[in-house]
Image (tube, grey):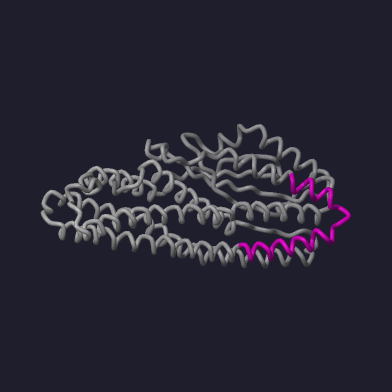
Amino acid sequence: MLSPNVDTALNMLTDVYTDFLGISNYDATCNSLFIGHVAKDPNWLVEVRSRTEILRAVMNEFMQQKPKIFAQIITSFINYQTTFDACAQNSKAITSTKQWIECLQLLQKTLKQNITLTNEAQQVFTKSYSQAKNAEELLASSIQDGWNELASEEQAMVRIATEIGSLSQSIASLGANVTAAQLRAGKAYIQSMVTISYGVVMGATTSVPFLSFAGALFTVGYSAYSTISSAKEVQQDLDKLTQLQTLASEEAQAAAITKAIIQTLSNMSEEFLKIDDSLPALSLLWQDELDKVNELINALQSGSDPALLTDLQTIKIASASWKTISEFVQLISLPPNIGKPVLVNTLNNTIQEQ
């Protein structure tokens, strides 16, 4: 039949949709990242702050292209469905092999365009991923300089960095997985920005702001605040982090916090690698459909009777499948609902809805 398996196609599109959301989240985190000062800024920290700007510039350049890329992917399905439906609706009026070939050649042309478009989109993502990783490596190098300077406190820094990673993972794990079935069922996905603010502990009771960043958390039917504030593991991570920070110097805390957050950024940037799987999968989908159309054209040109070609006789059934896919594509083109932002503050171990 001249259409893909509907469930397979919708799952592929959901993968692309969630990968785009993940990359947008990475960009938001890069742009929200704020690195403050300690009593006397060491050289490595000044470098980290400067190189953060490089990463931000890389992502801002990419994000200028992203809306167009996503819109083209969405439009490619809508345009093909429109062309396909026109062929299907006119199929009863087609009375000759020549007319069938002309109809199929329209599909052939659109499919070739869609393959080219999808492949070009992947190339943009691959280039941007490489640039982002290069910027991350510069950051990691600067942070390692600080780590080396504070070698005597390495164990304390490792424990702090590990606990920060645990806190980030605890919050991230509370997000809902976006599925094609839930999207089709009309589930309301809520996107809330969650800011985590880290402080440097000075003395037994005083903390000063040092670093903050924001990331998106997706929930279904409930707020991000209620999800995070009711999670015992998040509060446990906050309490343990404070205890660990009191055992380290200001510079050691700054190095540990910065290194842990850059690791979080590195993990988030892996969304670029996911798109390197999901976009080629879409390209293969289009290629499979092109192969079917090419085979039909060849068969007709070789003298086959259109009435005996099953794919031509089931073209209206295939058109219904493309309509379902097109409707889903229009659904994922809509932005998610925006929820109230949440602040997780390690300075006083509080979670607040803003």
Q: For the magenta stretch, what is the residue range? A: 133-162
Describe residue 268's horizontal placement relative to residue 320 as left or right. right
Tell me which corner region of the image, top left, top right, bottom left or bottom right, holds residue 32.
bottom right
Describe residue 341's horizontal placement relative to residue 292 as left or right. right
Nearest the camera: 352 or 94? 94
Tell me what residue is drawn at x 56 percent, y 34 percent.
Answer: 226
Decide whether the magenta segment is chiefly helix, strand or loop.
Answer: helix
Tell me what residue is drawn at x 74 percent, y 46 percent.
Answer: 162
Q: Provide residue 55's location: percent of width, then percent of height.
A: 61, 64
Residue 52 covered by magenta stretch: no
Residue 28 in view in this figure: no
The residue at the far right in this view is 152
Tell me which corner region of the image, top left, top right, bottom left or bottom right, holds residue 349.
top right
Describe residue 146's horizontal placement relative to residue 329 as left or right. right
Tell me: residue 218, above or below residue 37.
above
Nearest the camera: 112 or 22? 112
Tell me what residue is drawn at x 45 percent, y 61 percent.
Answer: 66
Q: Provide residue 188's location: percent of width, then percent of height.
A: 42, 38
Q: Provide residue 205's location: percent of width, then percent of height.
A: 80, 43
Tell me what residue is drawn at x 71 percent, y 42 percent.
Answer: 348
Residue 94 in view in this figure: yes
Tell me: residue 219, above or below residue 333.
above
Residue 158 covered by magenta stretch: yes
Describe residue 167's horizontal placement relative to residue 156 as left or right. left
Nearest the camera: 309 or 137? 309
Tell me which corner region of the image, top left, top right, bottom left or bottom right, holds residue 53.
bottom right
Quarter of the image for the C terminus: give it.
top right
Number of marks drawn:
0
Q: Provide residue 24's location: percent of width, then percent of height.
A: 51, 55
